Image (cartoon, rainbow, N blue to C red):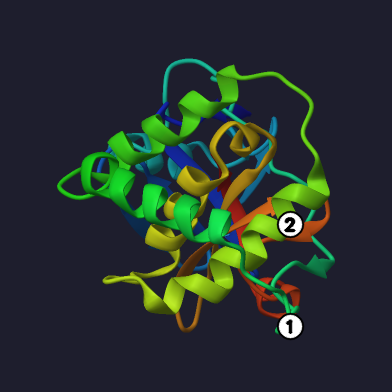
Amino acid sequence: MQYPLASTKYAAAFGPDLVVLDVEAGDYELFAGLAKDVRLIEAQRALSIADVEVAAALAEVGLLGDRLSSPPRSLPTPPNRDATLSPTHSVAVADRRRMATAWSKMLVRYHGRGFQRILATARCRAQLNQPVDRDRVVARARAFDRLAPYTPFQGDCFYRCFMLLQLLGADAHAVDWVFGIRTWPFMAHCWLQIDDVCLTDHVDKLAHFSPILAA
């Protein structure tokens, strides 16, 4: 039978394991070996479960919901190119200004806010609908990569991705913020991509993660 996931939960399989992200709590939960008994369907928003006892156990821990909900953004095709592999990219004065503006926005939009609220802020960009120059986005991502080491606080992948979205401004609506997981050892990671180009990481690293959510 098919069972929808709870509205705040997203799941991905990595080998035999199922990992669930609860965006309300900002936590991941590992169900070791469960991917052998369930199958992700409906754009990963529902589970196909043959064993009713397994379904009952997952419902008891709050994994399942009452109705199917659509993801806020479809999972994109994995990227196959890197934007950051350009060590000779020049940085203009305008790039430095955009970087300073992005960092100042982080003081209001990031610090002191929880995972779900930051995601909600990022999702607001999806309301925009205008043509985007992909080369311009890639160039600004390269400038960001050059300038990030000089910011007062560099943060982790989550921080850097959100900051780059601030720097991209109106162009950010064309960019996917993708979250991925792996197990043994468990790791969670996120990156930005536009079409088939990764803006914040190297594609060989991303090949070791299963996407769980796009924001």
Residue 174: percent from left, percent from top: 69, 36
> How would you rate the neighbour count of disc 1 (Cα within 10 Å): few for under 14, some for 14-19, many for 20 or more?
few
- Of labels 2 and 1, the one closer to you: 1
Asked if residue 70 can be seen in this view, the reply is no
- Location of residue 117 with respect to 195 vertically, above or below: above
Q: Quadrant of the N terminus?
A: top right
Residue 168: percent from left, percent from top: 57, 44
Q: Which residue occupies 58% across, 25% down?
A: 126
**Nearest to the observer: residue 15 or residue 137:** 137
Q: What residue type is labelled 1?
A: Thr
Secondary structure under the numbered disc 1 in the rendered image? loop
Q: Mark 2 points at which residue?
A: 138
Q: Which residue occupies 71% across, 49% down?
A: 137
> How would you rate the neighbour count of disc 2 (Cα within 10 Å): few for under 14, some for 14-19, many for 20 or more?
many
Q: Residue 35 carries which label?
A: none
Secondary structure under the numbered disc 2 in the rendered image? helix
Q: Residue 88 carries which label?
A: 1
Residue 210: percent from left, percent from top: 64, 62
As measured in the structure, the alpha-carbon distance from the residue carrying label 2 to the one carrying label 1 is 14 Å
Where residue 151 sits, quadrant-wise, is: bottom left
Q: Which amino acid does label 2 sit on?
A: Val
Q: Which residue occupies 83% across, 55% down?
A: 196
- Location of residue 188 with respect to 65 vertically, above or below: below
Residue farthest to the left, as pictured: 112
Residue 54 left/right relative to 75? left
Residue 63: percent from left, percent from top: 38, 38
